[in-house]
Image (cartoon, rainbow, N blue to C red):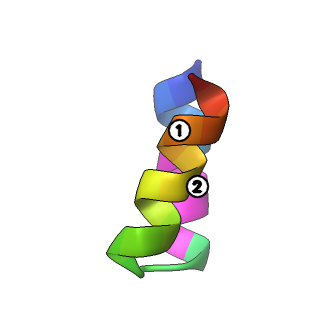
């Protein structure tokens, strides 16, 4: 489930920093 949410977020913002921040928040 988190993978799908991460995928959607990555589509919205393609910055790697944002991606890392989102992953840290989910964990």
Task: Compare marks 1 and 2 and give the one earlier in the sequence.
Answer: 2
The number of numbered discs placed on residues in the rendered structure image is 2
Residue 5 location, x and y as percent? Answer: 62, 39
Circle 2 — which element? helix
On the image, which quarter does residue 14 sit in? Answer: bottom left
Q: Mark 2 points at which residue?
A: 8
Residue 20 percent across, percent down from the top left = 42, 54
Is residue 18 depicted above or below 27 in this figure?
below
User: What residue would you read off at disc 1?
Assistant: 24
5 shown above or below 12: above
The span picked out in magenta is 6-11
Q: As displayed, is residue 7 above or below residue 3?
A: below
Quadrant where the C terminus is found in the figure:
top right
Q: Which residue is drawn at 56% across and 25% down?
A: 2
Residue at screen point 46% across, 30% down: 3
Distance from Cα at disc 1 to Cα at disc 2: 16 Å
14 relative position to 1: left or right: left
* Residue at (52% x, 69% y) in the render: 18
26 or 13: which is nearer to us?
26
Residue 1, percent from left and from top: 59, 18
Q: Which of marks 1 and 2 is in front?
A: 1
Left or right: residue 16 versus residue 13 is left
């Amino acid at each position: 489930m988190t993978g799908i949410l991460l995928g959607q977020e990555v589509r919205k913002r393609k910055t790697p920093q944002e991606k890392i921040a989102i992953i840290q928040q989910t964990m």
